[in-house]
Amino acid sequence: SSDKIGSPGPFGGCLLTSMAFSQSAPQDRPGSGSSLKQAGAAALGGSGSQVFTTTLYEQMKAKGLFKNHFPNIPPAGKSINVPLNDSAQQDLTPEISFPLPATPVNERKFRRISHGPGEICVHHGLKDQLLPAEDFRYGIRGQKGASTEDTMKAGLLLGVAAYQNEVAESVYESSKKEPLGKPWSRGHSLKMLPEGFGNPSGTPQDGKEVIYAIHQKPDTEDNRLLYKYTHNNFNPGERIERKYRWPAETEDSRFRFGHGLGQPQEGAGARLALNWEVEDDGSVRKTRLVQKNAEDFRNVHHTKVYHKSHPMQGANGPPLDPDFRHGVKSGISDYTAKSCIQGYYSLEEQLPDQDLGRCLKPGRRNVTVATRAFGVPSVRTDIPAPPPDKRSIADNCSYGDECSAAALLNPQRFDDRGVPDRDFLIRRPKDELRALVESCDVEGVDFDALWNESVPLFDDGLPLVSLDAMLFVHTKKLEDRVAALHTGTGPGLAAYKGAL
């Protein structure tokens, strides 16, 4: 009713005013819907007309970066859309803040992913095609009652009719040369000889001699060269003779191609290759006069090594302030990319939590005044280790007496025989040591002399000598004999052999 429409409700007055203004505006096109949109926006208070983007032209115009001397003339071209109020939320949800335009309906079938869920993927040319009904059949429907047998017998002639047809077609040349059911008649009168057709071959010749004509004389050298020139027929292993006129120096067996550098300095070749301002012989390059526009084009489009690319906006680059930075500055967040990478937490926030590695709950903390270590050590040096020969293979406990990795990689000399190096350092009495030396079966060893020289090595005066000390004395004697033999101060080779 009219009283309800004119009532000053929450949207009544402004809605009527907006509709009246839209109807009286002469610049709106009929049917465009712009007036209705304005009325709806005014009625809702502008809550549904939130704009997230603007154009780069409007942004530069609002900042006063240029002067518009003709405000009544709209700018040409299309300006780039930029975000109005950029924020991290809008950057993380671009599909909501900056939605992409939808694909037009008439172009969706050309996309690779144009089929919906459960739809069969077919070629875009087969989509939206109009197919005939299932009962549709191509061709023209024939008369009812005409069979294939009747069609084949339609031109069949029998009896007198067939004879008349044969007489009528006998005047044609095709009927004379190619009668039905007979071979092609060419009109030749052939007589078969008793020997058969053809001429005799004469004396038979072996096929092997025809293929491999070993009795045939080879071609002359002139014929071979001519055939090589016309057909490129070379003998096996024959090289191509290009008929070069080499100088007399090339006949030397030590001749080598190329320019001899003599004795170049070390690094001179690399320095010459890296220096582009000199010629190959080290001389300064000749100055060439070229057009300035061609040289400027080369300097712009071909960037020199270790130089930045030319911006192609004047000789000195774009007219920008030295402190100018590209991009849009965030007007909402105070954090920058640098702060996000380096972190902006305070020292208290960076410290670890109080309960990291320890318990803060009363009654559950292991607090003691003792200084001993709790738990069982990994290396059981607190208990006596069992002997290695009586230790179980299944015992994986470490008693601190295992060998190190260095001992495993470099074993002792007689580990494969179960004799460690420490047995050579044990001091033994004379009789026990004599038994060990005599069991080695070494000829020419004076045990008593070695014993008398080994006892003074120990300053305690006890009649105990280690096997290592006796080996040291014996090795020293052998070195003295060899040195005397080489210097000629000794008794000679005969005396040395006699001593051995």
Image (cartoon, rainbow, N blue to C red):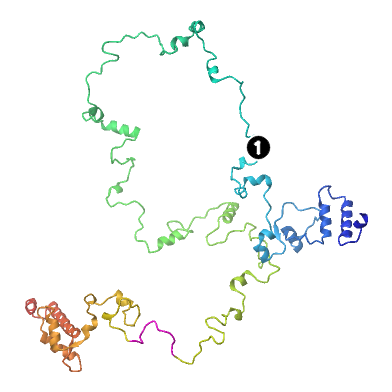
Q: Is residue 332 visible?
A: yes
Residue under label 1: 130
Q: Judge by depth and name the residue closer to the eye, 110 or 237.
A: 110
Q: Judge by depth and name the residue closer to the eye, 90 or 305.
A: 90
Q: Amino acid at mark 1?
A: Leu
* Residue farthest to the front, as pictured: 145
Dividing the picture into quadrants, the one containing residue 89 is: bottom right
Q: Judge by depth and name the residue closer to the eye, 237 or 170.
A: 170
Expressed as whole percent of the image width and height from the top left, the position of residue 303 reads: 55, 57
In magenta, the rendered stretch is 372-383
User: Which residue appears at 29% of the width and 33% of the height?
Assistant: 224
Relative to residue 160, is residue 333 depicted above or below?
A: below
Relative to residue 225, is residue 39 depicted above or below?
A: below
The prevailing secondary structure element of the residues shown in magenta is: loop
- Quadrant occupied by the N terminus: bottom right
Expressed as whole percent of the image width and height from the top left, the position of residue 288 reads: 53, 53
Secondary structure of the residue carrying numbered label 1: loop
> Is residue 329 rendered magenta in the image?
no
* Residue farthest to the right, as pictured: 3
Dividing the picture into quadrants, the one containing residue 471 is: bottom left
Relative to residue 463, is residue 150 depicted above or below?
A: above
User: Which residue appears at 53% of the width and 62% of the height?
Assistant: 306
User: Which residue appears at 16% of the width and 92% of the height?
Assistant: 463
Q: Is residue 324 visible?
A: no
Expressed as whole percent of the image width and height from the top left, the position of residue 420 reads: 24, 80
